[in-house]
Amino acid sequence: MTDAAATHADTTTAPGPPGAVTQWHAGLPRLEGTLPQDADALTRHLRAGEALLAALPPAPEREEEQRRRAADIVTASRALRERFIARHAEQVHDELTDGRSRFPRLSELAFAAAERYPGLVPDRAQLAAERALAQEHKEGREIDQGIFFRGLLRSPAIGAHLMASMRAATPRARELLDDFRRSGHVRLTTVDLERRDGAGYLTVHNEHCLNAEDDQLIADMETAVDLVLLDDSSHVGVLRGSVMTHPRYRGRRVFSAGINLKQLRDGRISFVDFLLRRELGYVAKLLRGLLLDPAAGDALGQTVEKPWIAAVEGFAIGGGMQLLLVADRVIAAEDAFFSLPAAKEGIVPGAGNLRLTRLTGARLARRIILGGHTLQASDPEARLLCDDVVPAERMDEAVEAAVRELDNPAVLANRGMLHLAEESPDQFRAYLAEFAYVQAVRMHSADVLGKVGRFGRTQEASA
């Protein structure tokens, strides 16, 4: 038993029959057997814990003492999951992937784990029930997914396999590829993709929320990025925001307002299908390219990568600013600004903590991430993030010039070598392992719930 679990066992009283929780704590298995033995012990004990939770009122209706008791059960259950996955990560992963011969995506892998090892991660029904609740009313079951993926990503071999799985083309992109090759245009729910003069232009059309990111946008962005990478006639990719309809920005383009805080407040931002998929999916593909055959990894001829241009108008906030850190050329309008308000929101800004210091230096990175410092495109310091700052009316001209400059075979060879020098795949894996857990916890932390409520109302009013 961990020290934390032992402390809880000493102080907990039963929510149901007298002593039930104390007895449950006393029965915490040691997990010192084989995988089947420990899996059986894990499932039996966690099922008993779920029964104790079910004896309590739903989370929004619990009184203070009941909330404490529920937290006590949940904390001990998570400690047990941590011990299990730390001990058996490689065996669990190999069973779920048939000895690493299959390459399931994140959500598929998580649901397979829920079926094969009941209690280890939430199943479909549990996640569906959570999805129907506001963020502050959830049990926080996605934290269990964070524990699971941290355990897998901490292993260099498993982490490499998981990252390769996510760098393969999505089924949706494969379905649309022939049409895009023929027509040069695809309109997705939130992204418009058009090929012009050898470049694939990804224009975000999430105007109702100032191009803020949500689950749908993450899925559409990955599909669009895949199509550009798979299309032989697209040599360069361009990321740009659409023209807004909101009165404050009517007729002007906006790059990105970051994560959709209203949807986070309402419980509609997915940990796996947004926060993890984003980093391991389309952002990783922007940086390192797409794997034609995940089993071959980055073997010669199996990686398709292209240079990317970010054209920033209005603002690049949060996740929008994170995209600048992986772009090969950043062009900003003179009146644009950039910020990573993660400390104000309470969450972790993706891989921004890993990448920003490399571009700006440690002191400025800390002011931006920890202090919420906003950079104006006209600031001298902004040149650490932008290659070109131009008048808004010259953005089209500047983007077209950058496309011509980057449409060069030597650019591809050198960008790959630059990325290896700046951030190794294993460094990214180790960072994502800790991010998986920390971000899951932050999403359900009391300070975040209070902040996203306030910021969500502000973002909603702005949109």
Image (cartoon, grey):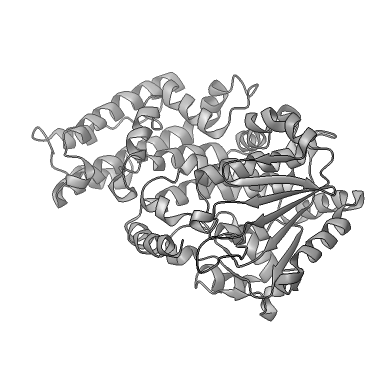
Residue 8, percent across and down?
Answer: 23, 45
Q: Is residue 154 left or right of residue 425?
A: left
Is residue 23 shown to the viewer in this render?
yes
Residue nearer the viewer, 49 or 309: 309
Is residue 363 shown to the viewer in this render?
no
- Please tell me which residue is depicted at 54% across the width and 21% down the height of the picture: 95
Residue nearer the viewer, 80 or 273: 273
Q: Is residue 346 left or right of residue 399?
A: left
- The quarter of the picture where residue 351 lies is bottom right
Residue 336, percent across and down?
Answer: 63, 71
Q: Residue furthest left?
A: 18
- The quarter of the picture where residue 16 lies is top left
Image quadrant in which the N terminus is located: top left
- Please tell me which residue is depicted at 9% across the width and 32% down the height of the picture: 17
Number of numbered callouts drawn: 0
Residue 188, percent across and down?
Answer: 61, 40
Residue nearer the viewer, 22 or 100: 100
- Please tell me which residue is depicted at 34% across the width and 25% down the height of the picture: 43
Q: Is residue 82 left or right of residue 316?
A: left
Compared to residue 376, the image places residue 341 above or below, namely above
- Please tell me which residue is depicted at 40% across the width and 43% down the height of the picture: 143
Residue 7, percent across and down?
Answer: 24, 47
